[in-house]
Image (tube, coloured by chain):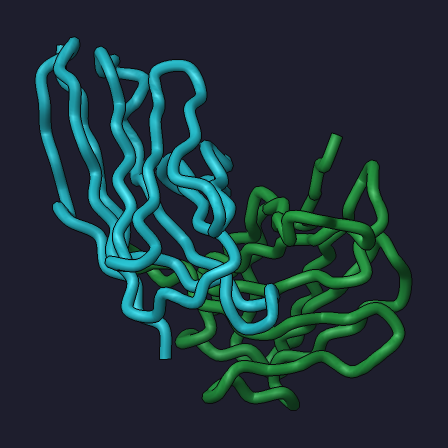
Chain colours: A cyan, B green
Amino acid sequence: KQEVTQIPAALSVPEGENLVLNCSFTDSAIYNLQWFRQDPGKGLTSLLLIQSSQREQTSGRLNASLDKSSGRSTLYIAASQPGDSATYLCAVLTGGGNKLTFGTGTQLKVEL
Amino acid sequence: GAVVSQHPSWVICKSGTSVKIECRSLDFQATTMFWYRQFPKQSLMLMATSNEGSKATYEQGVEKDKFLINHASLTLSTLTVTSAHPEDSSFYICSARRTQSSYNEQFFGPGTRLTVL
């Protein structure tokens, strides 16, 4: 059974700081890995999707890496802003491309 | 493109009543849709996979007679919570996958907050 863990569970940083969120998964047989953002009481916003054959993806201030063999992914956020405050979820796709297993989430707060 | 809507966005009902939640893919066809549940301060858990024109596949521990799923068209799936009880109160989120998708990417709806009194 795939298990996805995110560390840390919560993080508070001052504005402007670069930060790294970590995600680990137990079964390396994945199709892809995705990072999402969720604001309180809202749905999910997809940030980055990394295919199993890829090592990283970048979008603006965000960079996600994937090391499938070790079961790890990181989300790097550069020059953090208060608007980045949200819960960040990683999810891995397995089960014939049907089953998306979510991590426990990292609650990020960027302070002025 | 790839917009998914849910209706209603929130609903409050009395214990014992049934509630239907709709999930629509607005600008693409989705042979497969997914239903997730999220309890407060927890992550999303897959409840079931909905396939157009066939029966849904439920995850272990999810009662198929309680959570009825219908995927009658390529753009609409519905989740009906039957005889809802307070423990069914949760945030329900659907997602949809394009019929022809090389990346198996799921696009998520905005969620439905269900409160059962």
Q: In the rendering, at what x and y percent does residue A39 appear?
A: 38, 35
Query: Where, quadrant-wise, is the C terminus of chain B in this rendering?
Result: bottom left
Quarter residue B2 falls in: top right
Q: Residue at x 21, y 38 (%)?
A: A21
Q: Residue at x 46, y 41 (%)?
A: A54
Nearer to us in this view, B114 or B102: B102
In the image, taking residue B51 as reference, residue B111 lies left or right, namely left
Q: In the rendering, at what x and y percent does residue B49 appear?
A: 65, 72
Nearer to us in this view, B2 or B78: B2
Q: Residue at x 16, y 26 (%)?
A: A19
Count the numbered circles shown: 0
In the image, taking residue B88 as reference, residue B18 lies left or right, namely right
Q: Residue at x 77, y 46 (%)?
A: B25
Nearer to us in this view, A27 or B1: A27
Nearer to us in this view, A33 or B46: A33
The answer to whether residue A97 is seen in the rendering is yes
Query: Where, quadrant-wise, is the N terminus of chain B in this rendering?
Result: top right
**A53 relative to B13, above or below:** above
In the image, taking residue B27 as reference, residue B104 lies left or right, namely left
In the image, taking residue B106 as reference, residue B47 lies left or right, namely left
Q: In the rendering, at what x and y percent does residue B18 appear?
A: 66, 75
**B40 relative to A65, above or below:** below
Q: In the rendering, at what x and y percent does residue B109 appear?
A: 62, 45
**A20 relative to A78, above or below:** below
The answer to whether residue B115 is seen in the rendering is no
